[in-house]
Every structure is written in structure tokens, then in C-alpha cells.
């Protein structure tokens, strides 16, 4: 939905040359109001970039694609923004352990509910 909205906006020529005709101060004010309304004191606007990168990574998007989406020049910078969560990595490790255990079949690995929730299996 957001992607299609941005795609439509890109087709519209804006005199200012901006994608959205909103000032940086208006965005900052809206962010501060939402943060205060939620009762969150230790959150900065820039933290959203870290969240964006981490969520993409946890959804299985590769680092090179995240690098391109975030506009980074190097993978090293992208790695700073992507925060690995051991809980997210654990189901993959469990799946591999089970796969290489002689008593486990491929179907049993694919049907692990925890793995299905964490990774998309087509």
C-alpha cells in the first residue's frame, strides 16, 4: 500500500521537487507529539532507521537489498543499522540441527511452527 502510494506520487511533478510537500519541522513536530502521546521518552527520530533496517533483515531481506533501500554506500554501514536478535536466529539454527539429525525428515523441519512463524517457506 505504501509502495503504491509512493509510486503514484513519483509520477506527479511537484514544484518543490519533494516527494511529499511537508517540511522537516512539521515531520519532527508530528513525531514528537506521537512519542509524547505514547509516553515514550527515550526514542529519537533516527531510531526509526535502525528499526526499518532490522525489521527488513528479520523478514529475510538480504543485506545488499537493505543497503540499497537505505541508501548506504557500504555493507559495513548497513550492518551498523541491522540489529540481529538471537531469538530470530534461533529457529533457523533449530531447523538446521533437526535437518541434519538422521531421525528427522525434511517434512518435520518444514512443519515446525516456530520456524514457520519466523521464515516464509514457499
Image (cartoon, rainbow, N blue to C red):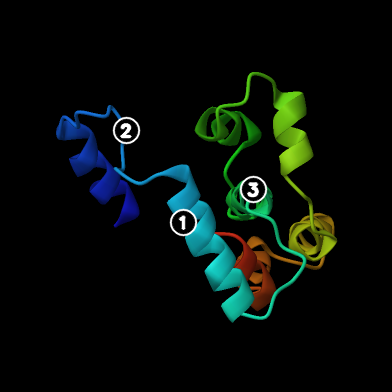
- Position of 8 relative to 41 (above/below): above
Q: To which residue does mark 2 refer?
A: 18
Lower position in the chain sequence, tag 3 or tag 2: 2
Q: Nearer the viewer, residue 34 or 92?
A: 34
Mark 3 crowdedness (10 Å alpha carbons): few <14, some 14-19, many ≥20? some
Which secondary structure lies at badge 3?
helix
- Mark 1–mark 2 Cα distance, whole angstroms, equals 39 Å
- Mark 3–mark 2 Cα distance, whole angstroms, equals 28 Å
On the image, the x and y values in percent for residue 94 come to 81, 63
Q: How many marks?
A: 3
Image position of 41 (left or right of 110): right
The residue lying at 62 percent from left, 75 percent from top is: 36
The residue lying at 77 percent from left, 26 percent from top is: 76
Mark 1 crowdedness (10 Å alpha carbons): few <14, some 14-19, many ≥20? few
Q: Nearer the viewer, residue 41 or 115?
A: 41
On the image, the x and y values in percent for residue 66 come to 58, 36
Q: To which residue does mark 3 refer?
A: 57
On the image, the x and y values in percent for residue 12 come to 15, 35
Which secondary structure lies at badge 1?
loop
Lower position in the chain sequence, tag 1 or tag 3: 3
Would you identify the image quadrant in which residue 87 lies? bottom right
On the image, the x and y values in percent for residue 79 come to 76, 35
Q: Nearer the viewer, residue 94 or 54?
A: 54
Mark 1 touches mark 2? (CB < 8 Å)? no
The residue lying at 74 percent from left, 57 percent from top is: 92
Q: To which residue does mark 1 refer?
A: 122
Residue 102 visible in the shown view: no
Amino acid at each position: 500500500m505504501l509502495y503504491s502510494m509512493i509510486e503514484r506520487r513519483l509520477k506527479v511533478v511537484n514544484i518543490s521537487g519533494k516527494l511529499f510537500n511537508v517540511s522537516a519541522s512539521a515531520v519532527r513536530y508530528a513525531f514528537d507529539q506521537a512519542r509524547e502521546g505514547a509516553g515514550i521518552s527515550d526514542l529519537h527520530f533516527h531510531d526509526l532507521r535502525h528499526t526499518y533496517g532490522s525489521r527488513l533483515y528479520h523478514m529475510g531481506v538480504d543485506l545488499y537489498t537493505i543497503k540499497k533501500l537505505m541508501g548506504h554506500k557500504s555493507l559495513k554501514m548497513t550492518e551498523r543499522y541491522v540489529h540481529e536478535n538471537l531469538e530470530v536466529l534461533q529457529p533457523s539454527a533449530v531447523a538446521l540441527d533437526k535437518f541434519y539429525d538422521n531421525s528427522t525428515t525434511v517434512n518435520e523441519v518444514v512443519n515446525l511452527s516456530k520456524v514457520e512463524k519466523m521464515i516464509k517457506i514457499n
